[in-house]
């Protein structure tokens, strides 16, 4: 596995640069108090991440506990319906039901090597909290998860899952009481004990070196998918498509394909209710450059630079910023970004569930809609979709939306 890791790394040698920049984006916009902790994390990454010992341990946990490699499934009915050749990379089959576990296991292993005594994490909808709690339990570390008080209310089943996995869930009552406030609170905790505590961040966002670290840990998705396409389809895809919240499943899928000039890359953001400020979470397609949580990237802000509230039917995409590498890949033209609305995503979710026997997460459904739209414009295209997670967690919202309509029709 290390040869493919190295090949991937040929590109990573260019970005980020020594200052954590992807072109103009990225960097590290943090209070002085955070700098020593981030420096220590960077040193730890330099020492361990690419070492044979760390990579062997990571590969072992991914194989025997997470269940990797995840399958690549041909989608015969979607292929027929769309007039394309559709392949699904099945991150929904990974332990705890989404790609987030890859990052959580990798960071927890790193935390142990750095001598940390406890793991802290933030969570919005609860998926990264569950993955972090599971990884910490597996590797014998105590875990504290910060979660906005509003999210604690509306994601009660995931709070229970984290508690059963042995984690302490701390509701955050300050700020916006959702994901942004939870990240701020986790950073505060980390600053107070940077040696004993490891902060496991859940997406490819935040100050350098997090976007780089998360990308490296999630690139297992694209490395596997690339090899599986060659083996099962006999060719690379014409396009690889993923949904984009903070951007971790997308960068993990895209990165190993960046040097394959013939492979198009397409990210799909949450278009929510429409293009108005506050009605979506489409920071790449509708945002402008600014600083959010330690990183210079495209964000949703008003004319005064005030960060805006976002809306999406999908909690996992509901964030006003995006990982800085995506901002760079958009400006460089290597990756195209579009959005799918709430209704479009829910429609694609129903189609995938009914015709392929796979209930995807609502986040994932944005990518599936993007793929259907792409097929419409490119008949016969060979399309790879990252099925980032399963939809069981979304049953409460599906009950209130598409199932209600089904029952009344
Ligand atoms: C959290 C989540 C996402 C969005 O996060 P990214 O960092 O953009 O990948 C997408 N899909 C699922 C299933 C998730 O749980």
Image (cartoon, rainbow, N blue to C red):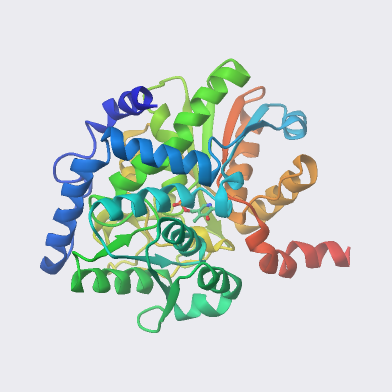
In the image, residue 38 above or below residue 336: below
Position of 223 with respect to 96 (left or right) is left
Residue positioned 50% across, 38% down in the render: 63
Position of 134 with respect to 307 (left or right) is right
Residue 168 falls in image quadrant: bottom left
Position of 55 with respect to 63 (left or right) is left
Q: Residue furthest right?
A: 409
Residue positioned 32% across, 43% down in the render: 325
Q: How many marks?
A: 0
Q: Residue furthest front?
A: 140
Residue positioned 44% across, 39% down in the render: 60
Residue 216 falls in image quadrant: top left
Residue positioned 58% across, 52% down in the render: 97
Position of 49 with respect to 61 (left or right) is left
The quarter of the image holding the N terminus is top left
Image location of residue 99, percent across then percent down: 50, 48
Image location of residue 74, percent across then percent down: 68, 29
In the image, residue 385 above or below residue 84: below
Regarding residue 306, the answer to whether it shows in the image is: no
Image location of residue 188, percent across then percent down: 25, 73
Image location of residue 208, percent across then percent down: 22, 51
Q: Residue furthest bottom?
A: 173
The quarter of the image holding the C terminus is bottom right
Regarding residue 58, the answer to whether it shows in the image is: yes
Residue 4 falls in image quadrant: top left
Q: Nearer the viewer, residue 295 or 327?
A: 295
In the image, residue 279 above or below residue 25: below
Q: Nearer the viewer, residue 169 or 363?
A: 169
In the image, residue 381 above or below residue 206: above
């Amino acid at each position: 596995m290390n040869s493919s890791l190295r090949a991937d790394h040929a590109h990573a040698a260019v970005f980020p640069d020594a200052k954590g920049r992807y072109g103009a984006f990225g960097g590290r916009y943090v209070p002085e108090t955070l700098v020593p902790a981030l420096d220590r994390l960077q040193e730890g990454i330099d020492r361990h991440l690419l070492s044979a010992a760390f990579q062997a341990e990571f590969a072992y946990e991914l194989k025997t506990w997470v269940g990797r490699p995840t399958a690549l499934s041909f989608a015969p009915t979607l292929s027929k319906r769309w007039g394309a050749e559709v392949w699904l990379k099945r991150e929904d089959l990974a332990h705890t039901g989404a790609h987030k576990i890859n990052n959580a296991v990798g960071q927890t292993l790193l935390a142990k090597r750095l001598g940390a005594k406890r793991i802290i994490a933030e969570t919005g909808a609860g998926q990264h909290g569950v993955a972090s709690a599971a990884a910490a339990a597996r590797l014998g570390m105590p875990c504290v998860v910060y979660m906005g008080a509003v999210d604690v209310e509306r994601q009660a089943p995931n709070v229970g899952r984290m508690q059963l996995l042995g984690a302490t869930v701390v509701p955050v009552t300050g700020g916006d009481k959702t994901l942004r406030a939870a990240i701020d609170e986790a950073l505060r905790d980390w600053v107070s004990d940077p040696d004993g505590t490891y902060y496991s961040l859940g997406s490819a966002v935040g100050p350098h070196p997090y976007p780089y670290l998360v990308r490296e840990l999630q690139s297992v998705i694209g490395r596997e998918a690339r090899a599986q396409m060659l083996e099962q389809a006999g060719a690379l895809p014409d396009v690889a498509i993923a949904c984009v919240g903070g951007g971790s499943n997308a960068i993990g899928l895209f990165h190993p394909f960046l040097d394959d000039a013939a492979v198009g890359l397409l990210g799909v953001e949450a278009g929510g209710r429409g293009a108005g400020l506050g009605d979506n979470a489409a920071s790449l397609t509708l945002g402008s450059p600014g600083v959010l949580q330690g990183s210079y990237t495209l964000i949703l802000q008003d004319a005064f630079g005030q960060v805006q509230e976002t809306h999406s039917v999908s909690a996992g995409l509901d964030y006003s910023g995006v990982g800085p590498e995506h901002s760079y890949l958009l400006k460089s033209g290597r990756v195209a970004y579009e959005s799918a609305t709430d209704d479009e995503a829910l429609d694609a979710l129903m189609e995938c569930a009914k015709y392929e026997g796979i209930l995807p997460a609502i986040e994932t459904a944005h990518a599936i809609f993007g793929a259907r739209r792409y097929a419409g414009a490119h008949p016969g295209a060979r399309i790879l979709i990252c099925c980032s997670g399963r939809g069981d967690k979304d049953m409460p919202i599906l009950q209130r939306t598409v199932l209600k309509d089904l029952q009344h029709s």
